Image (cartoon, rainbow, N blue to C red):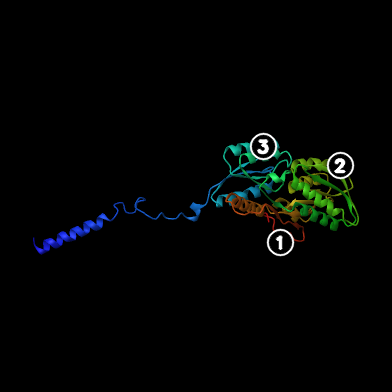
Amino acid sequence: MGKRTRRLLLLLAVMMFVLAGCKKEVGSPQDNAIVPEKSEEEQRPEYKFGFTCITMENPYFIALESAVRGEVEAAGSTMIVMDPELDSDTQKEQIQEMIEQGIDAIFLSPVDWETITPVLHMLKEADVKIINIDTQVKEFDLVDAYIGSDNKNAGYICGEKMITDFPQGGKIAILECPTQNSINDRITGFEESIAKAANGFEVVAREDAKGDLTLAKEAFEKIIKDNPELTAVMCGNDPTALGALVAAKAANRGDIKIYSVDGSPDLKKELEKADSQIAGMAAQSPINIGKTAVGVAMDMLNGETYIRETYESVFLISKENLELYGIDGWQ
């Protein structure tokens, strides 16, 4: 055998040895000893949330739901939304349906802060985390977290504005909603505030408007008719204030001043008018509440530390500072 032949055979043997040490399926999952790391987006857990509020007819809750949904979807999770339309029985049935659909947590603003209690027990038994938003439930120990506005202060600053507008006091009305604790707190703060007035205010009428525009209009029509000396009205929220405004205009009572809590675009547009009867409103931010609520929910579900109670600050919007906040959206 010649030298050249021996060299070729040796080279061939070396190549076969090298190839034998190599894997045939280069680049396949079986071939790769190191599994590539998942991206941050692929690693984050996906949760299913429920969302139920008092009524989706209220622009505040529409803005709140939008803010919550945006944050939930940005985190790679999903959300089921149902509208109880001011009916506590409907809310209970819808929450049961969401439990059956396998929600991990729920953003909940109760139609009735007392009758929601059995539903809270139902959610607990299903191991669903409860993020109570906007209006507190009565049995607060049953929820995992609460995020809402400083409602008592919202009512308080409305009272301060009324005292400034009516230094001699006067006869006033209150449009409230005893089943919604957020509105209860606002009315409590308002009453504490006007109690400090040098010249007293007399509450000549109060009605449960359920936070609804139509019901507020009907209630205030009767109040105006029965109380011709009425000077002002405190409203639990902006839909109530708009209902009161419609009733006052229909009765040609442009002298009655209206105070409210929300700071909605609709009421800010009324405030902007030169002859507006809207004296002022305590503004809250459904956008901030929604973002905070989702942040708390994610920390909770991921086993991280979270804040159990969050109260977003409120502030007064009046003619004097309206231009700072605009009229086209929520602050």
Tell me if 10 is positioned left or right of 248 in this view: left
| Coordinates of residue 37 in the picture (x, y in percent) | 44, 55
The kind of secondary structure element at disc 1 is helix
The kind of secondary structure element at disc 3 is helix
Residue that mark 1 sits on: 324
Nearer the camera: disc 2 or disc 1: 1
Work out whether residue 143 can be spotted: yes
Residue that mark 2 sits on: 225
Nearer the camera: disc 3 or disc 1: 3
| Coordinates of residue 299 in the picture (x, y in percent) | 60, 52
Quarter of the rendering containing residue 13: bottom left
Residue type at mark 1 is Leu
Residue type at mark 3 is Lys
Tell me if 273 is positioned left or right of 75 in this view: right
Residue that mark 3 sits on: 92
| Quadrant location, the N terminus | bottom left
| Coordinates of residue 219 in the picture (x, y in percent) | 81, 41
Q: Is residue 35 above or below residue 246?
A: below
